[in-house]
Amino acid sequence: MRKKQLNFFNDTKYRIFRIIMFWFFCAAFFVAAPWAVYISLGYRFNSGEKRFVRTGALQIDSSPEGATVDIAGYAANRTTPCVVRDLLPGKYFLRVVKKGFYPYSVMVEILPSRVYEANIALAPLMGGMEPVSSGLYVYRFFISKKIFGDRILAFTDKGIYMLNKYFSGQKMISPLILGPDAARGLEGLIDGSDNIVFWDKSRIWAQPSGAPEGTGDGDGLIYVSPGAIKNVFLGLKDHYAIVHDGNTLVAVNIAAPAVSYRLMDFKADDAQVFYDSDKETLYIKDKGVSGMEELSKTQLVRLLPFSDEEKKYKKNP
């Protein structure tokens, strides 16, 4: 008896099966495609906000290299130098650990479409509160990348010192002693060609970066905020500190701190400011401007009402 062969092209059940499978895969494609596109463009689904948000990244460099990176709420399992991508916007507790060195912990804030650079110098572990580098107790330090190599700017019990990446070769920049609490409360530092500028939430200091040992300028306080300092930039070849202070933008003459200018007021509490020192151009993101590509930009020199003396400086810095 001959077996009946199934005609796959004419059999009704098979044709129905093919139709069902076709529409199934079509539906799967239309569901999965948007997810794939969003992910490829750097978006992740934020379950808390119930929407896709653009992610940021964290670039971590340490001196010495090979330190273990731990980010609270995120399984990093990496060693420095490294880049951790696809992080949802928000604050993360970063901890960097290496055997033989003090652990380093810091809170970092990841913003959409931006890379947060964490340059970390690890202090050698010598037991308890033993001093480093010929008797200096380091309260806080910043790593500065220069053309001829990295250097450490350390706030110590004897003043502000410049050290190499091995915490040796010390040179005093200033006798200014902030103390452990004030030093640990610093928000940032800029190592400029003429000055180092550092700040906390309410104050800004400046010290000559090339001053002979021990000849820094007093307490170096150049600005006290009536609100809360969000960011600081150096403008016009280190001549001005550009301060994002609460909802205002202020320019402070570093050589003569009494001379300051209120450049503009922002409409939004979360306004953002960026400064291109090469082009001396401010980029402002404020209420009514959407998208990073639509930042308004203004030449800094057009905003400053220079005095006659400052006009001479502008022509012959």
Image (tube, grey):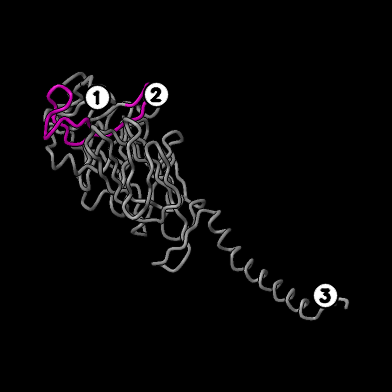
Say which amino acid is labelled 3: Leu
Give residue 311's position: percent from left, percent from top. 36, 31
Mark 1 residue crowding within 10 angstroms, few (<14) / some (14–19) / many (20+): many
Residue under the image location 40 percent in, 27 percent down:
315
Residue at mark 2 to residue at mark 1: CA–CA distance:
16 Å
- Which is nearer the eye, 5 or 67? 5
Dot 3 or dot 2: first in sequence order is 3
Question: Which disc, if any, is residue 126?
Answer: none
Nearer the observer, 93 or 97: 97
The residue labelled by disc 3 is 6
Q: Earlier in the sequence, mark 2 or mark 1?
A: 2
Residue 54 counted in the magenta span: no
User: Which residue is the site of mark 1?
Assistant: 163
Q: In front: mark 1 or mark 3? A: 3
125 inside magenta stretch: yes
The mark lying in front, picked from 3 and 2, is 3
Q: CA distance from mark 1 to mark 3?
A: 84 Å
**Magenta stretch bounds:** 123-150
The amino acid marked with disc number 1 is Leu
**Tag 3 secondary structure:** loop
Most extreme residue toward the front is 1
Who's the residue at 57% across and 59% down the image? 36
Reading the chain from its start, which is encountered first: label 1 or label 3? Answer: 3
Q: Quadrant of residue 305?
A: top left
In this rendering, the answer to whether 29 lies above or below 103 is below
> Which residue type does callout 2 highlight?
Ile
- Residue 262 showing in the rendered view: no
Whole-percent x and y of residue 78?
38, 42
Left or right of 161 in this view: 28: right
